[in-house]
Image (cartoon, rainbow, N blue to C red):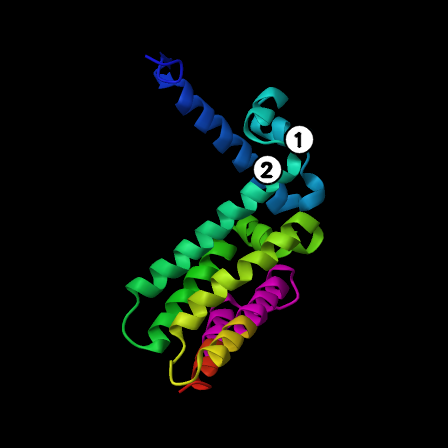
Amino acid sequence: MTVEGRTWAGTTLTDRRAMRRRQLLDAGLDLLGSGGSGAVSVRAVCRQSKLTERYFYENFADRDELILAVYEGVVEDAHRALVEAVDTAGKGAGARAEAAVTAFVTLILDDPRKGRVLLLAPLADPALNRRGTERIPMFAELVREQLSDKTDEGDRAMTATALVGGLANLFTAYLGGGLDVSRERLIAHCVRLVLGANALHS
């Protein structure tokens, strides 16, 4: 049996390593999602996770690698929520738009840490800013797939990119306290924007 496969207190070394990585990522999410980029340091993450620096460096080369991993985890959550919402929505552009917007708003508001990591933290951290820019095409592609195909791909791509940027700014303003509207009103407005964009291609 390999060292990784040996059990101690009912868990293998591989399991314990995965658990420690999860603890560090959870601590990073707490810190980045509450205090922003400036709140995240190796020492703060270790204190929050109750792990030593030895275990931190066993998983991450430095603080930037950790926050990028935290960010990517939230991006994956958002992407999965959107795909699942569209796949399980009723027929019609309206049903898909409402399902997708509701799923995204639920993600960023029910766990505000994720909303801040996804939308606010990249504004202050250069590494996250670059990664956020790199992730725009992935979300734009989800939108493009839902647009009417009666116009050429170039127009659909431009509309999808513009819509993702506009919605991101809207959600950022909402999370930052700049918009005093209810969740329901926010969702309804975003759905109208999505459907209005789709109408450009009908």
> Would residue 192 appear left or right of 89 to someone viewing this image?
right
Within 10 Å of disc 2 (Cα), the crowding (few <14, some 14-19, many 20+) is many
Q: Secondary structure at mark 2?
A: helix
Q: Which residues are magenta?
A: 163-192
Image disc number at residue 66: 2
Q: Amino acid at mark 1?
A: Val
Considering the image in quadrants, where does the C terminus appear? bottom left
Q: Main secondary structure of the magenta part?
A: helix
Q: Quadrant of residue 176?
A: bottom right
71 to 23, vertically: above or below: below
Q: Nearer the viewer, residue 106 or 43?
A: 43
Whether tag 2 and tag 1 are in contact, CB under 8 A, the answer is yes
Q: Amino acid at mark 2?
A: Leu
> Would residue 74 appear left or right of 127 to someone viewing this image?
left
Q: x and y percent of residue 97 in the render?
A: 40, 72
Any magenta on residue 175? Answer: yes
30 to 14, vertically: above or below: below
Q: x and y percent of residue 106 in the render?
A: 45, 58
Asked whether residue 84 is in view, the answer is: yes
Q: Secondary structure at mark 1?
A: helix
Q: Quadrant of residue 169?
A: bottom right
Image disc number at residue 42: 1
Q: Which sits earlier in the primary sequence, circle 2 or circle 1?
A: 1
